[in-house]
Image: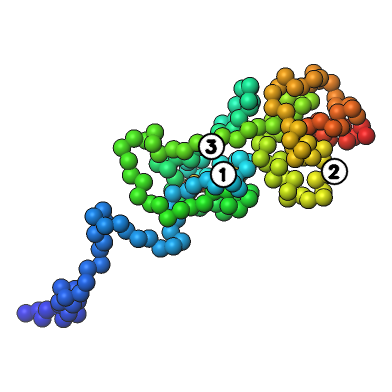
């Protein structure tokens, strides 16, 4: 005859008289640890719309669409909570470090997938010479603040700061095949046009 396993018997008796380990969710809210990785949310005060987070998102929960032909060229960045795995890559690699943050919000269940996405829009800046996309206006302003006095070496960033940015492709005055001339120095140029101009000067 086998004797009962005394260790298991002791654990069973102890469990009967111990407080439960499970929670009462959803009857009561479940409190998660402070550093819990939940729903990612953009901080529009510090997000500059650069799109770096989109490039590192492993599940494509973050997507980006640039409409450069619209009257007001826009970038739209969307985050889908139904595709997010809360890895934190977006926050870890954010250009401004706080443009997107993982909150403690974790109860994201719903019945409609369309409700599980948030989109933010950012105004784009196009090259005044060739019409190529340079980046978002917020990004240029952020560069100005980041560079300090060094920003004075780049007229495009200076113009961004002084509020003289143009938005519409109609602002392009020269055909793209014509190289940038010295008279283009105080215009908002993409890196390619800027490089061609610098070689001339
Ligand atoms: S937490 Fe991960 S999966 Fe979710 S949006 Fe950020 S990078 Fe993508
Ligand atoms: S990397 Fe940061 S600043 Fe750039 S778009 Fe993403 S959240 Fe915004």
- Coordinates of residue 186 in the picture (x, y in percent): 85, 32
Please, is residue 15 above or below residue 118 in the view?
Answer: below
Q: Disc number at residue 44?
A: 1
Foreground label between 2 and 1: 1
Considering every residue shown, the one lying at the far left of the view is 1
- Dot 2: few (<14), some (14–19), or many (≥20) neighbours within 10 Å? few
**In the rendered structure, which disc, 2 or 1, sits on the residue that comes first in sequence?**
1
**Which of the 4 image quadrants contains residue 56?**
top right
Q: Could you say whether the residue bearing mark 1 is in a helix, strand or loop?
A: loop
- Separation of residues labelled 2 and 1 (CA atoms): 28 Å
Q: Is residue 148 above or below residue 74?
A: below
Element marked by disc 2? helix
Residues under numbered marks 1 and 3 in contact, where contact means CB atoms less than 8 Å apart: yes
The quadrant where residue 125 appears = top right
Task: Please report whichever mark, 2 or 3, sits nearer to the chain's N-terminal start.
Answer: 3
Task: Report the number of discs.
Answer: 3
List x then y, in percent, for residue 157.
Answer: 77, 40
Locate residue 114 relative to residue 147 in the image: left or right: left
Residue at left offset 79%, top offset 25%: 129
Determine the residue positioned at 77% across, 38% down. 162
Residue topped by disc 2: 153
Residue 31 point in image, percent of width and height: 35, 60
User: In the visual, does 20 lie left or right of 175?
Assistant: left
Pointer 1: residues within 10 angstroms few (<14), some, or many (20+)?
some
Sort mark 3 into few (<14), some (14-19) or many (20+) by Cα contacts within 10 Å. some
Give the CA distance from mark 2 to mark 3: 31 Å
Q: Which of marks 1 and 3 is nearer the N terminus?
A: 1
Residue 13 at what x, y percent from top left? 15, 77
Label 3 residue SS = strand
Asked whether mark 2 lies closer than 8 Å to ligand 2, one says: no
What residue is pinned by disc 3? 120
């Amino acid at each position: 005859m086998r004797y009962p396993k005394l260790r298991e018997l002791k654990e069973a008796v102890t469990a009967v008289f111990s407080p439960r380990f499970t929670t009462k969710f959803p009857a009561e809210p479940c409190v998660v640890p402070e550093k819990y990785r939940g729903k990612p949310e953009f901080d529009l005060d510090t997000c500059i719309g650069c799109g770096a987070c989109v490039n590192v998102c492993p599940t494509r929960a973050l997507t980006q669409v640039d409409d450069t032909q619209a009257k007001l060229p826009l970038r739209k960045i969307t985050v889908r909570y139904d595709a997010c795995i809360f890895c934190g890559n977006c926050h870890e690699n954010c250009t401004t470090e706080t443009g997107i943050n993982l909150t403690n919000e974790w109860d994201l269940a719903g019945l409609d997938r369309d409700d599980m996405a948030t989109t933010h829009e950012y105004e784009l800046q196009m090259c005044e010479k060739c019409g190529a996309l340079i980046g978002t206006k917020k990004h240029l302003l952020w560069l100005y603040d980041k560079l300090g006095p060094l920003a004075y070496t780049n007229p495009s960033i200076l113009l961004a700061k002084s509020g003289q940015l143009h938005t519409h492709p109609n602002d392009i005055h020269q055909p793209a095949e014509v190289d940038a001339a010295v008279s283009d120095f105080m215009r908002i140029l993409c890196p390619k046009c800027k490089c061609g101009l610098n070689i001339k000067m």
